[in-house]
Image: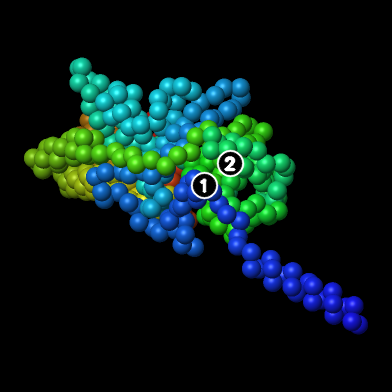
Amino acid sequence: MKQFVSILSICMLWAMVVQAQPPARIPPDLAALINVPYLVPESAPTSAHVSSTVLRFDKRIEILNTSSGSESETYLYINTQNGSIATRTGRSGTLGDGSFNTNDKKFRLSYYTPAGLYYTYYNQEKKGELEHYEVTMNTDIIAYSSNRGFEKTSVSRSGSSKNVLPQNLQAAPYKGSVTSAPTIYLCGGSTPRQFHLKRFLGYAGIGYVKTDNGIMMIVEMSSDGGSFKATKWEDIDLQLDKTPFIAVENRISEKAVTGIDEKIAELDAETYSGPCAYLYQAKKEWSKQEQERQKQALARMNQGNLINDINNSGLGALIDFQDPEYSLKGAEIEADIKICNSENSKITTENEAQRQSKAIECANKTKIEIQKAKREMMAITRRYPNDKSKALLEKRKVLTAYQKAAREYDCD
């Protein structure tokens, strides 16, 4: 019993000594690199961070990309205060020192906010003059990855540590439980056998990750398909003035809206007479409503949040602009006009009577197909109330089927 008490006392004393010891000291240069205020809260702020005319970044990472035997490089810029990032990608050795030379005609910068907004700033030379443009993901569709695979998952040690960065900082390899999961090298503080990854800030698997053991840097990610490796990681004070960049969407919208207004003015000037005048007037009113609908969609084209709310984003407006469901109403009125004109045409011969009968029958069959397509499209709208892109794809299939059936009738 005395021996047991003695062993217990030694264990308690050792535990007190261990608890009294300060945590492992993080080198000052590493401490500066992993100071990321944006990742401190448990959940990410949702502000879009685009109100300022200046984009600011305090971290710059040079990344070597290797895939299928070819290499390219990416500069990743991070604002550790608000969580926004930017990237520049090109062939190895073509991006210079990573600074923002907006006078270079090849300058191109992609900018992402944590709320899901995306912008590209680029230059284009026209008639010897360098012009600066801004375009959003709403009209410039890109391959975008939110790196959700590095959030809310656990990773375990899977090999020996190595130095990756010029600062001679040790990075330990970790891998998730899924066989196909990539191996990531984590750097910062202690490296226990297992981590739980909570929130990620970066691009292509390289960047910062908040863990249950503090904020770490992912300095390398490799898989069977290739690898991304940080070759330089530094503190910077870099800014981009957005003022000279002209919004492409605004120019597109301005030209399109001008065309719509001209079309509405032409419609307003049209007058009709005869037994089918009421149908021509109905077509005119539908055409004006359709022009106004498209005008409203254009006004929303460069607004919204693509990642978190695609239905109400500019891309959602673009989908509304293309929605074929609205065009079917116009096609139905056209069929009614053909029927009305045929019924009110003067018949003097038997052949003309037969042609009239066939025209009316064909137009009625077309109307049946239109109404069938309308019902199917309305059902699709109800089926996908929160997925406009899926609904658009399904509606296009219905439209294709209707157009095929209409061609087979050959009413003309």
List x then y, in percent, for residue 359. Answer: 33, 35
Q: What element carries label 2?
A: loop
Q: Say which of 393 and 21 sits in front.
A: 21
Residue drawn at (57%, 49%) of the image: 188
List x then y, in percent, for residue 177. Answer: 70, 50
Q: Say which of 286 and 37 sits in front.
A: 37
Lower position in the chain sequence, tag 1 or tag 2: 1
* Three-letter residue code for mark 2: Leu
Instruction: Choose top left, top right, bottom left or bottom right for residue 302.
Output: top left
Instruction: Choose top left, top right, bottom left or bottom right for residue 124.
Output: top left
190 lies left or right of 333:
right
Quadrant for the C terminus, please: top left
List x then y, in percent, for residue 294. Answer: 25, 44
Q: In this rendering, does residue 377 appear at all? A: no
Quadrant for the N terminus, please: bottom right
Residue at the disc numbered 2: 169
Question: Which residue is outermost to the top?
Answer: 128
CA separation in Å, label 1 and label 2: 8 Å
List x then y, in percent, for residue 407. Answer: 41, 31
Q: Say which of 99 and 374 sits in front.
A: 99
Residue drawn at (18%, 38%) of the image: 254
311 lies left or right of 26:
left
Residue drawn at (35%, 31%) of the image: 99
Q: Is mark 1 on a helix, strand or loop?
A: helix
Instruction: Choose top left, top right, bottom left or bottom right for residue 402.
Output: top left
Question: Which residue is outermost to the bottom?
Answer: 1
Tell me the tag on residue 158: none
Residue at the disc numbered 1: 30
Question: Are the two marked residues, 1 and 2, in contact with CB atoms closer than 8 angstroms?
Answer: yes
